[in-house]
Amino acid sequence: MDSLINAAARALAAGDSIGALKRVALRNDAPAMALRGIAMAQLGDFARAKALLRGAVRAFGPLEAVACARCVVAEAEAALASRDLAWPGKALGDAAATLAAHGDHANAAYARFLQARRLLLIGRIDEAARMLAKLDPSSVPPAARALYELVLAGVEMRRLRARAARAALARATDAASEARVPALMAEVEAALRALNLPAARSVAKGAERLLSCEEVEDLLGSRALIVDACRRAVGRRGKVVALARRPVLFALARVLAEAWPLDASRAALIAGAFRLKVADESLRARLRVEIGRLRRLLLPLADVVATGRGFVLLPRAGAEVLVLALPVDGEGAAVLALLGDGEPWSTSALALALGRSQRTVQRSLEALMAAGKVQAIGSGRARRWALRQLPGFATSLLLPASLPID
């Protein structure tokens, strides 16, 4: 490569996008197009960046396999930054394999980091963790090492291992400082701020309290019987009953837990589970059936006993009962959590990350926009959604993940 290409590459590595563009802005050869694409991605013009990188792949041609693979990796990074989660992950895996086969192990590892980050964003936490476990961050440049630690911190936060996440972010801070890339340092600082925000609410004996990530981690390791409204499960010290696919049973469990140590009336249980205020005999009969199903599922953890006015939850071994709830209420809480990373998201990306239909996500976004919490950017297929202001809570509990005690 010539001196201008080398200078532009060094500028990009230091985060100086404008300086890189000054050197290659008027050139249309393949290396210049690739560098311009990376620079445009750093400046936030992701559509232009992806177009330039695809043009660079065509210009390099099939004989330049390593250069093409590097462009694919750069395009994948731009896609993730723009929350284009439907971008084909197989292409990124093929690019990583090509780079590794040609001895470019640093860029191959970076591609694997990006694969893990995509898995994290769409809620496939265990897969992301397994991929990270196979990688060695010590052999990559500081910027890539910071990305590795950021993804690892995200995995630990989703698993509610706050102390491990904090240690990973400390290592990410050191790596970002060594890399001296301002955007990377800002991303690490934002992750640290999110970790320090309230992550959940505990509801016990009629009292509510905001919890930090560390407090949630301690709570999950305690003797308490926890009705987890974040992941729709009931658990205690390693024993978990998942109720994500049993919404009626989970609603009954939550009403019983919120009433504990007192009993919950039949009217309250019917209203909570069936969303009806008037209870007739058919609903009472259905309530008895659903309580019987819940009793069988919770048998290792607690008993559900009938009382004169309703039912009461009796945990094993005299444990306390509490509800672990979202920091904010409402159907759009999970959508707000994803938008809380500060990036504009498409409806399709939100649906993919949440495991919901696009229409369900659209209804949540419309309600949030009417409440003045989110705003739409663009129109048609280019429309993206962003928060009007950053939330005052952490997102780790709101994003899809399995319970850490599964």
Image: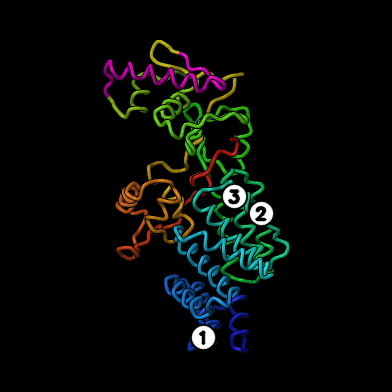
Q: Give yes or no for residue 285 being in the magenta stretch.
A: yes
- Taking 17 as reference, is 352 left or right? left
Which quadrant, please, contains the C terminus? top right
Give the labeled residue for mark 3: 155
Q: Amino acid at mark 1?
A: Asp
The structure's colour scheme is: rainbow
Q: Which label's residue is closer to the chain start, 2 or 1?
A: 1
Q: Amino acid at mark 2?
A: Ala
Q: Are marks 3 and 1 in contact (CB under 8 Å)?
A: no
State the image coordinates of residue 217 (x, y, percent, origin top left). 61, 39
SS class, disc 1: loop
Residue stretch in magenta: 278-305
Give the labeled residue for mark 2: 168
Query: What main secondary structure does the magenta stretch of the protein show?
Result: helix
Near-viewer residue (392 or 171): 171
Q: Amino acid at mark 3?
A: Val
Q: Is residue 114 above or below residue 233?
A: below
The picture quadrant where one finds residue 249 is: top left
- Of badges 3 and 1, the one in the foreground is 1
Which quadrant, please, contains the N terminus? bottom right
Any part of residue 177 in sight = no
State the image coordinates of residue 221 (x, y, percent, origin top left). 63, 34
Label 2, label 1: how far apart the Cα atoms are: 40 Å
Near-viewer residue (272 or 249): 249
Q: Residue lying farthest front? A: 63
Instruction: Give the residue at x 47% y 28%.
Output: 206
Label 2, label 3: how far apart the Cα atoms are: 10 Å
Give the labeled residue for mark 1: 29
